[in-house]
Amino acid sequence: MSTNPAAVDSYWMPFTANRDFKENPRIIVGADGHYYLTEDGRKVYDAFSGLWTSGLGHCHPGIVEAVQKQVATLDYSLGFQAGSDKVFELAEKVTSLAPEGYSKVFFTNSGSESADTSLKIALGYHRARGEGHRTRLIGREKGYHGVNFGGMSVGGMTPNRKVFGSSLLPCVDHLPHTWDPEHNSFQRGQPEWGGHLADDLERLAALHDGGNIAAVIVEPVAGSAGILPPPVGYLERLREICDKYGILLIFDEVITAFGRIGEGFGAQRFGVMPDIINMAKGLTNGVIPMGAVMVRDEIYDAFMQGPAEAIELFHGYTYSGHPVAAAAGIAALDAYVDEGTFEQSRALEGHFEEALHSLADHHLVTDVRNYGLMGGVDLQARPGAIGARGLEVHKKCFWDEDIIVRNGGDILQFSPFLNSRPEDIDMTVEKVRRVLDTLD
Ligand SMILES: Cc1ncc(COP(=O)(O)O)c(C=O)c1O
């Protein structure tokens, strides 16, 4: 290893078993297309396309060029009361991929910031319309909306919440999650069972009075919980109940936007239009951190009142709409269109589904789920060592099979490049099976 051990020791890594990692660090020094280059000189196939981020592949020439040019032209511009040309251009490009009726985009720097921004916009919207009493927020069990306090509060992943439980937002409830192995294990695509679980929103509306609820936030396909596609009719039912009570529906599309499920946005794929759409990751193909919140026109319009010189939304970040991130975003969105990336992704879905479900017969596999180019494979946990088997697969894949496979505990997660070839998918699954065969 050439990275100095003191340097390795200095870094407190995110969402990482630090002590375990530092015994044998997995350090990446380069990337090209579908491969990483490791510090020990190996080419490692990236079966997770970054962290759901890099669907076009790494170091995409068009994005690299745009970033290099931008950083030498306008490295930073303040974004309050002024803005770079690039951020306006990107906002228009984002809306050009969206269904009709969404023409305003607010920029953030991450998915977590998008989550908190969307919740604040929802509260501000109701207040601007004289309904400031609508303060209750509804998330979902197993939901993931990042790690800031708002997103954590509406999120439903226990390990992310348990230490911070007493400091989460008040006035938050959760819908039940939709995974029930008795009814929907080894499901291909959307489960037939579970649409009725959306009716729990009726229960919460009856409990609190629907007129006190500001917003419901869900991922159209839950990602970090291990890929939970929405049951048939579920999203439609949520939309219906939200409409009935004047509740805003927020789709957290940090993973599902930009081709991961074969369309610009998951809303289009499912034919269900939320009021607010959150995004990040694929917005710049992961090249520069950036997130965004896109709203229906009437939400923006509700804020546009009072004196014209008054700031309508007291919210923003120093790096909102950073020009270099915006240049990366423009180049990424151009590439999606020019290269037909969403269509490529859609065309690969069937092959991906078949390949992933071929693992179902392995004695350590307890469930397989997929939607679009998102896949989850559950492993039987080792007694008394939850997550150990998943981590072992990740490490063996990296060291012995030259491939990155992500584990979330004992769930293996798959996020192939949107422009993968069928043989890349086959190779991924073969390598994973080989590693599973070595496990006790
Ligand atoms: C649906 C969803 N929302 C929010 C986030 C948080 O994004 P970030 O890590 O960029 O803050 C993620 C990250 O995976 C996500 O999947």
Image (tube, rainbow, N blue to C red):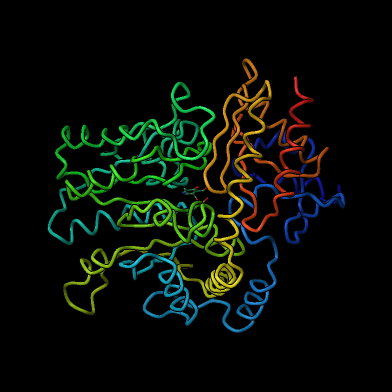
Q: How many marks?
A: 0
Q: Position of residue 385 (x, y in %)?
A: 63, 20
Q: Position of residue 155 (x, y in %)?
A: 41, 40
In this orientation, which residue lies closer to the viewer: 207 or 265? 265
The residue lying at 25 percent from left, 69 percent from top is 312
The residue lying at 81 percent from left, 40 percent from top is 401
In this orientation, which residue lies closer to the viewer: 48 or 150? 48
In this orientation, which residue lies closer to the viewer: 277 or 366? 366
* 168 sits left or right of 65 in the view: left
Q: Is residue 316 above or below residue 243?
A: below
* 185 sits left or right of 171 in the view: right
The residue lying at 78 percent from left, 56 percent from top is 29
Q: Position of residue 421 (x, y in %)?
A: 70, 54
The residue lying at 52 percent from left, 44 percent from top is 371
Quarter occupied by residue 281: bottom right
Give the residue at the far top of this rendering.
383
Q: Position of residue 409 (x, y in %)?
A: 60, 31
Q: Is residue 68 above or below residue 173?
A: below
Image quarter in which the C terminus is found: top right
